[in-house]
Image (tube, coloured by chain):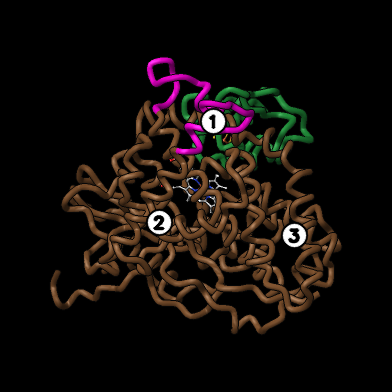
Amino acid sequence: MSQHEQVLNYPIPNDAALEPPAEWAELRSKCPVAHVTLPSGDQATLLTRYDDVKEVLADPRFTRQLSAPDAARLSAEGGGVFSSDLAQIIPDGGEEHQHWRRLVSRWFTAKRMNALRPSMAKTAEELIDDMVKRGVPGDLKADLGFPLPVYVICDMLGVPAADRDRFSYWSDTMLNLTRYTQAEIEASQLEFFQYMSGHVAAKRAAPDDDLLSGLIAAGTPEEGGLSDLQIQVTGIALLVAGHETTANMIGKMVAMLLADRSRWERLLADPSLIRTTVEESLRLDANSGFGLPRYLREETEVSGTHLPKGTTVVCSMAAANRDESAFEAADQMDMTRSPNPHLSFGAGAHSCLGQALARTELQVVLEVLLRKLPTLDLAVPVAELERVEGLAVGGLRTLPVRW
Amino acid sequence: MKVTVDEVKCCGAGQCVLIAPEVFDQRDDDGIVILLESEPGEDQYSLVREAAAVCPALAIEIAE
Ligand code: HEM
Ligand code: SF4
């Protein structure tokens, strides 16, 4: 790399909890294919434009697997979830991935998610009641945002929610790119794996009507099902994916709505805006985490820039979601925006499998909060909200609220 | 309005069903899209356009 070329450090440092770094707009307009230095010191190529990010995420030549010897390492400690051995067991592309995806997707259809609404709402109500009992200020993240998605996914998988502190630690070590040593990460993954193997074995002995039992019932790979190893890893992937992402998003969404309380009031007056408001907060989430890294297996071009084989790109969906060429008044929150084709769940064949679940959880949380705590407000000034650092998935440290 | 869906492209994310349940459904066994109404009524037009615009797999086509 020439010394004259300015190389940006990635992730781009940003103090504001809910606002984007100024660099995004500049990168989109002047340097849509940018050289960046990752925490490991390795170089990567950052994409920030809507069209580029959408195209690359849907292009199978860009693989998720960062295991090639010349792929960039994300951090000195390894790559957390992005380069773990576990990630190799779920097929990455082609027919095999599609087969895996269809076996799992049946558990996440919109119809099934709608059927879960009443029980989700009940869980949310109980969690809010407990928070209210403990008194002002509550921490909406710890009291509601975190436990709700864990209860829901544990119930779907058929694993005890009582073990959630253990999952939290395990999934944190997988999603945290900087906090843990390689040895800690490996030890934690092994424990998680043993835990899940035990559950799969128990379901095999005594099947129930949950997702893990369903995957077992689909038979061996020869019979059109998955191997035991794949079932175990799928269980882990769903627990991790269904946990931090939605949990953090609940906190960030509520924070965005309370940061300008006229938004909250507008929802109180017209709850029919809940669905489009959830989408708009997903779009505007400026603290969504690392973005998605991809490794390029053959040379190509993006936005007229040549990318050699072996390039590691990082797609910033959060920057792309604020691209003026894709969204009118892209930096403004429009609670009625429709359509809202944001990229927060990715795009193409790998786009989030749990998005109907995530959307339903976010909608239900908002419905119940508006109904039970209409006077909800931030208990600290917005400027005091702090980001969680180092996680592949961004979030707020706490969300102090009063009512 | 004429709607078509591409089952091969569809990644079963269920966005279309959440937005326009009168026009789209998903197969129970793998989550792949089912088109309930290939010529939906006018009251559905804006929802169907929205579903097509946000489908992550670009699997919904509309001819108007
Ligand atoms: C607001 C919450 C969520 C966000 C922002 C989110 C975001 C994403 C993104 C960006 C991807 C694409 C990854 C890639 O292309 O490499 C993804 C994939 C995935 N998500 Fe989510 N997700 C959320 C919630 C969930 C939930 C609740 C589940 C299920 C329990 C889930 C399960 C998955 C799975 C299994 C994949 C991999 C799909 C595949 O490779 O085919 N996610 N998610
Ligand atoms: S939104 Fe697109 S990908 Fe998702 S189920 Fe409908 S057609 Fe399939």
Quadrant containing the C terminus of chain A is: bottom right
- Badge 2 amino acid: Met
The kind of secondary structure element at disc 3 is helix
Neighbor class of circle 2 (other Cα within 10 Å; few <14, some 14-19, many 20+) is many
Q: Which mark is drawn over residue A327?
A: none
For residue B36, what is the image quadrant? top right
- Is label 3's Cβ within 8 Å of ligand 1? no
State which chain disc 2 sits on: A
Taking the spot 57% from the left edge, 62% from the top edge, the residue there is A248
Q: Which residue is mark 1?
A: A203
Q: Which mark is drawn over residue A127?
A: 3
The Cα atoms of the two marked residues, 2 and 3, are separated by 27 Å
Dominant secondary structure (helix, strand or loop) of the stretch shown in magenta: helix
Q: Position of residue A46 (x, y in %)?
A: 33, 61
> Is residue A267 in view from this perspective?
no
Tell me where the magenta segment starts and ends, as one range: A198-227
Residue sitting nearer the eye, A388 or A370:
A388
Relative to A387, is A151 above or below? above
Q: Kindly indicate whether the residues beneath marks 3 and 1 are on one polypeptide chain.
A: yes
- Badge 1 amino acid: Lys
Chain B colour in the picture: green
Relative to A293, is A207 above or below? above
Q: Which residue is mark 2?
A: A174
Chain for colour brown: A
The Cα atoms of the two marked residues, 3 and 1, are separated by 29 Å
Q: Is residue A55 left or right of residue A204?
A: left
Disc on the earlier residue, 1 or 2: 2
